[in-house]
Amino acid sequence: MNRATRATATALALLGALSLTACTGGGLPDKGAAKAPATADPASRSDLRPFYGQRLAWTDCATDGYECARLTVPLDYARPGNGRTFVLPVARAAATGPGKRIGSLVFNPGGPGAAGAGSLEEGMDEAFGAAARARFDIVGFDPRGVGGSVPALTCEPAEEETEEEPAAEDETSDGVAPLYPRTEADRSAAAAGARTAAEDCEKHSGPILRHVGTDDAARDLDILRAALGERKLTYLGWSYGTSLGTSYAEQFPRRVRAMVLDGAIDPSLDWRQRVLSQSAGFRRSVDDYAERCAEIAGDRCPGRTPGEIRALIERLYQRAEREPLPVAEDSSYAEYGGMDATAVLDAVSMAMYTPEDQWEPLSEALREADRGDATKLGALGDEEETGSEDTDTTEGEEQEDASPGASEPPAVPDDNGDAALTAVNCLDVPHPRSVRPYWDALAPADKAAGVYGTAGVTAELTCRDWPSGERRPHKVAAEGVPPVLVVGTTGDPSTPYAEAVSLAEQFPAGMLLTYEGLGHTAYGRGDACVTAKVDAYLVELERVAPGATC
C-alpha cells in the first residue's frame, strides 16, 4: 500500500462510525421518505427455511469459559438457494445465574468491522452489568465479511502483488494530500489515492462487496435469533451497532423484546451532514482534552495551559504536513517514512474514545513527538487492533440442520477491520460520483470543525467509486417495535449526543438516557447509574423516565 492509499485508509479508520445514509449525484434525497417496515415473514419463505431451521452446534472455544459455533446465512437474500453463503463465527458466555436465565442477549461492538465473536472471547462480556450477565447468555457474532466470517473482506494486495506491480507514473506516492487539500495537485492526489483504495477492494473482494451491507447483516441477525431458539431478540449495539439494531427494528419490529442503542447514529443525516456532525464531535473532544487534561493526566499533560496544548497539537499537524514525523525503525509507520498529518490526526482523535485510559499515554506521546520522536504516538492504537486469529476455532465443525452450499473462499486475512469498515460504510452510503460535491463540502467542514472536518470529507472520497446501495436518509420506520432505549454521551467524539436525541425521538415510544461525560458510548465504562438503568431495562423491561440523566 503506498502512502497515498494508506492516508485514505487511516482517515476512514478515524471516521469509523460514518453515516449509514445516502446521497447520489447532485441533489439530496427526500429525507421524509422512510423505508417501509417488512411485512412478510422471511422464515415462511421456502428458500430461507433451511437457514431459519439451523440449530447451533456449540463446542468449547479456544478461550476457556466460552462456547463457539458457526451460523450459515445466504450470501444474497434475493437468491438464497443458489448455494453461496457466509459462515459466521458465533460465541457465547453462559448466564452466570442459569436458574433465572431469561435467554440470549446478542451484542454488536461497533465498527463496522469489529468482530463480535472475537471480542467476546477477549472478555467483552465483562462490559455488561452483573444483573444482565446473570440473566442472559451474552452472544457475539462476526457480521458477514468481518473477522472470521467465511468469506471475509480484504482490500490489501498480497505481498507478491505489491512487489510485482510498479506504481503508475502519474501516481503521487511521494506524498499525501494535506488535511485540507486546497490546490488542484493536492485534490488530484487525494482523489487518486481514494480511487486506488476502491480498486484494491474491488480486485480482492469483488464477489462479496455488494453483499456486506447493514440491512443484510440485520437479516442475518434474525436468522441468529432463530438459531438461538429465541422467539424475540434482546440486543445491545454500541456505535455502528446502533445502525445494525435500527435496521433490525425496521425490518423486524415485532421480533424485538428489548433493544439498547448506545452511541447512536442518526439515519436521517445525509453523508455530508454526518461528516460535519462527527468531525465537529472530534474537534470538541480535542478541545475538552486541552481544557480538562490536568483532571485525568495531571502533570503529564503536554502543556501548562489549554492554549499551550492546542498549540502543540496544531504544531504537530503542520510539521507532519511538511514532512512525516520521525519514528523508530520497529514502528509500524517506519516503512512510510514516519507519521504523516493524517496519521497524527488519527492518533489524536482515536485517543478521545476513552479519556480515562488514553489521555495519559496520549499526553506523553505528544510531548515526545514535539521533541522529535513520534514512535509512542504511532503506537497508541496498536493494542486496540484485533485480528481474527481466535475466531476460526470452529473451522471444520459441522452444524445440525446445516444450510445448503457453504462457500469455498480464499484464506481469511489476519485483520480485515479497515477493509470491512470501508466496504460497509461505502455500500450503505451511496455517494456522489463527481468530485465536485466533496470539494464544495471542504470550506463548510473547515468552518465547522477545522482539519477534523476537512480530513473527514477527504476520507469520503473512496466511496465515490463504490457500488451503490439502496439506502437513503430517512426517519426510522419501525411501527410495532416496543420501547427502544437510546443512550447518549454528552461528550461523545464519534457519535455526537445530538444524534442520540434525534434517534430516540424517531422511535415509537423511544427512550433517551443521557450520560453526562466524555468519551465514546457509556454502558460498560464503569458508571454505576448507566449500568443500573440499562440492566433494569434489559432484565425487567423497566422503562427509563423522560429526561433521565446519569
Image (tube, rainbow, N blue to C red):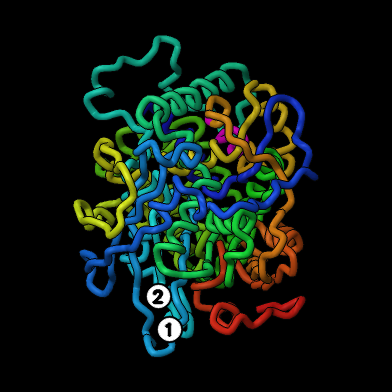
Q: Which of 311 and 21 is in front in this view?
A: 21
Q: In which quarter of the image is the N terminus?
A: top left
Q: Residue at 26% across / 75% down in the picture?
A: 65
Q: In this view, does 192 lie above or below 20?
A: above
Residue at the spot of label 2: 137
Residue 549 figure quarter? bottom right
User: Does the CB distance between marks 2 and 1 fall below 8 Å?
Assistant: yes
Q: Residue at 26% across / 35% down in the picture?
A: 410
Q: How many numbered marks does the figure carry?
A: 2
Q: Is residue 3 left or right of residue 12?
A: left
Q: What stretch is highlighted in magenta?
A: 455-462
In magenta stretch: residue 458: yes
Q: Nearer the viewer, residue 268 or 222?
A: 222
| Residue 64, horizontal then vertical, whole percent | 22, 72
Q: Residue at 70% across / 71% down in the picture?
A: 511
Check residue 101 in the rendering and tell me which mark sits there, or answer none: 1
Q: Residue at 66% across / 57% down in the picture?
A: 496
Majority secondary structure of the magenta segment? helix
Q: Which of 51 and 69 is in front in this view?
A: 51
Q: Distance between the residues labelled 2 and 1?
A: 8 Å
Mark 2 is on which residue type? Asp
In magenta stretch: residue 539: no
| Residue 461, horizontal then vertical, whole percent | 57, 29
